Amino acid sequence: MDVLTFIETFRYPAIFVAAIAEGPLTMVGSGFLLRLHLISIVPTFILLLLGDFVGDLFWYFVGLHGLDLFVRRFGKWFRINKEAIVHVKRLFRKHEDRILLFSKLTTGFGFAVVVLSVAGMSRVPIKKYIFYNLLGGFFWTTILLVAGYLFAHVYLLVGKALHVLFLFVLVTALVLGFYFFGRIMRKKVMNDEL
């Protein structure tokens, strides 16, 4: 089964599952597929929003029901340590609403898993968490879908011989962009520069 056949057969379930695991990259990739007319906007947008929300809700419940144990066992795999949790928890007390909303718009200030987990650990009311998560997710999903759509438009303008190179450069730029943005935001948060 080639990639296009797979996408046509499992496109919407794959989008949902991929959004749970890695929302931002899935959103950009879905924008790309939208421009290529391989998927439709309404189901794609809904599944991206819900998939990303399910992933975030998982981390909320990890924080609510045992973040300390998780950090001891798996923290190094997700770049979570006790110092980051203490720092984010202190920031939560001062700026709970802002952090919930802006963490969605900035991929968690560079350490989304910590922010989402500390929301659970801090006992942020679930209704408030859902409201701010979906509100921020709506804007974030829109922005990244449009970015992917525009990248695909440029891709279609580039000659066929350059398509593979363009895709490689695009994926590399996205991964590096998310990585360095995360590092910058992490440093700002840890230095109280919000």
Image: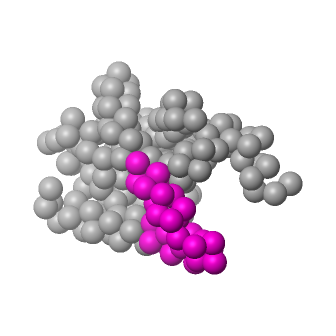
Among the 4 quarters of the image, the one containing residue 164: bottom right
Answer above or below: position of 31 versus 179.
above
**Location of residue 1 in the rendering, given as x and y in whole percent from the top left corner:** 86, 54
**Location of residue 104 in the rendering, given as x and y in whole percent from the top left corner:** 34, 44
Answer above or below: position of 63 versus 80.
above
Outermost residue, right direction? 1
At x 58% / y 77%, what residue is drawn? 162
Front-lying residue, 47 or 149: 149
Compared across the picture, whether 139 is left or right of 14 comes to left
At x 63% / y 72%, what residue is drawn? 160
Compared across the picture, whether 146 is left or right of 132 comes to right
State the count of labels: 0
**Location of residue 76 in the rendering, given as x and y in whole percent from the top left corner:** 50, 65
**Location of residue 29 in the rendering, given as x and y in whole percent from the top left corner:** 54, 53
Answer above or below: position of 129 versus 24.
above
Compared across the picture, whether 119 is left or right of 190 comes to right
Can residue 192 be found in the magenta stretch? no
Image quadrant holding the C terminus, namely bottom left
Answer above or below: position of 154 versus 37.
below
Compared across the picture, whether 101 is left or right of 60 comes to left
At x 27% / y 63%, what residue is drawn? 185
Q: Magenta region: which residues?
A: 146-174
Q: In this orientation, does residue 177 appear?
A: yes
Main secondary structure found in the magenta portion:
helix
